[in-house]
Image (cartoon, rainbow, N blue to C red):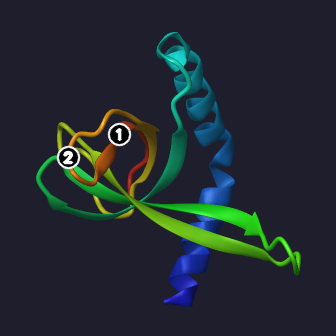
Amino acid sequence: MSEQRNEVSSELLADTADAEQVVAEVAHTSSDRGRRKVREGLVVSDKMDKTVVVAVEDRIKHRLYGKVMTQTTKLKVHDEENSAGIGDRVVVMETRPLSATKRWRLVKIVEKAK
């Protein structure tokens, strides 16, 4: 399990330049509607119709002890074409509430799972 996680992490680090460029392009085009949050993550579930669950990792520093920790947040993301699958690296953008728990939409699939 940890070997698989490390392998995925190393792949993510290798392609961060592409993802950062996509995030910058998306943020630039959305400026006319105001600032919307843009995140990158891995699809962990695609069992729902037109919805995928994306795990977004955020590195935070503990305010007292200074340890850098990884915090994972699962977002329910609207995928109109059902194009994303498990293991895909995607870029998502904040949007209006689409359901009780869905407030993000799929912008682009950066890398398909192998």
- Extreme residue in the left direction: 49
**Kind of residue sitting beneath label 2:** Ser
Above/below status of 104 relative to 114 = above
Q: Nearer the viewer, residue 18 or 99?
A: 99
Above or below 79: residue 75: below
What residue type is disc 1 on?
Leu
Question: Can you tell which quarter of the image residue 101 is in?
Answer: bottom left
What is the distance, in whole Å, between disc 1 and disc 2 at their CAs?
A: 15 Å
* Residue extending farthest bottom: 1
Element on which disc 1 rests: strand
Residue at point 88%, 75% (across, down): 66
Q: Position of residue 58 (x, y in %)?
A: 63, 61
Q: Quadrant of the C terminus?
A: bottom left
Q: Residue at x 53, y 37 (%)?
A: 37
What residue is pinned by disc 1? 106
Upstream in sequence: badge 1 or badge 2:
2
Disc 2, SS:
loop
Whole-percent x, y for residue 70 in the image: 66, 72
| Label of residue 99 in the image | 2
Relative to 68, 24 lies left or right:
left
Q: Residue at position x 52%, y 15% from top?
A: 29
Q: Nearer the viewer, mark 1 or mark 2?
A: 2
